[in-house]
Image: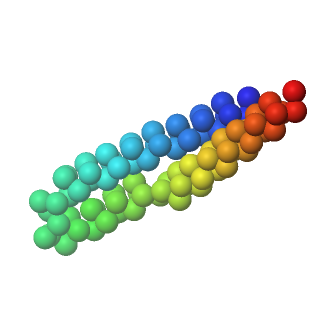
């Protein structure tokens, strides 16, 4: 069960990171023509910050998911050898 939860965390974190990367590319594509204007630069910065809000949360979820996955693998290994 621990392996499934860890794999789910890792899969969700990777999926979320991919969506964030695509959103950053879209913001860059939309904001780049108007970056030379002062208002365009402000809007581009605000959008980039808004898209980047969850970067650390996604990283922590990925690291935590890997830890849970490795812990589950260790438990399976330990209990398999005892039987």
Name the spot of residue 30 as percent of width and height, x first: 19, 52
Residue 49 placement, left or right of 72 = left
Task: Look at 35% across and 49% down and name the residue there.
Answer: 21
Residue 72 placement, left or right of 54 = right
Name the spot of residue 61 as percent of width and height, x first: 59, 49
Count of marks placed on residues = 0
Name the spot of residue 10 as percent of width and height, x first: 56, 41
Task: Look at 39% across and 42% down and name the residue there.
Answer: 19
Residue 54 placement, left or right of 29 = right
Q: Is residue 15 above or below residue 37?
A: above
Which image quarter is the N terminus in? top right
- In depth, the one of 4 and 75 nearer the eye is 75
- In depth, the one of 50 and 52 nearer the eye is 52
Looking at this rendering, what residue extends furthest in the right direction? 82
Image quarter of residue 42: bottom left
Which image quarter is the C terminus in? top right
- In depth, the one of 79 and 31 nearer the eye is 79
């Amino acid at each position: 069960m621990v392996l499934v939860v860890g794999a789910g965390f890792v899969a969700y974190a990777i999926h979320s990171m991919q969506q964030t990367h695509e959103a950053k590319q879209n913001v860059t594509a939309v904001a780049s023509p108007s970056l030379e204007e002062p208002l365009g630069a402000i809007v581009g910065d605000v959008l980039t910050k808004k898209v980047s809000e969850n970067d650390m949360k996604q990283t922590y979820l990925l690291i935590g998911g890997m830890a849970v996955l490795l812990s589950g693998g260790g438990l399976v290994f330990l209990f398999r050898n005892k039987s």
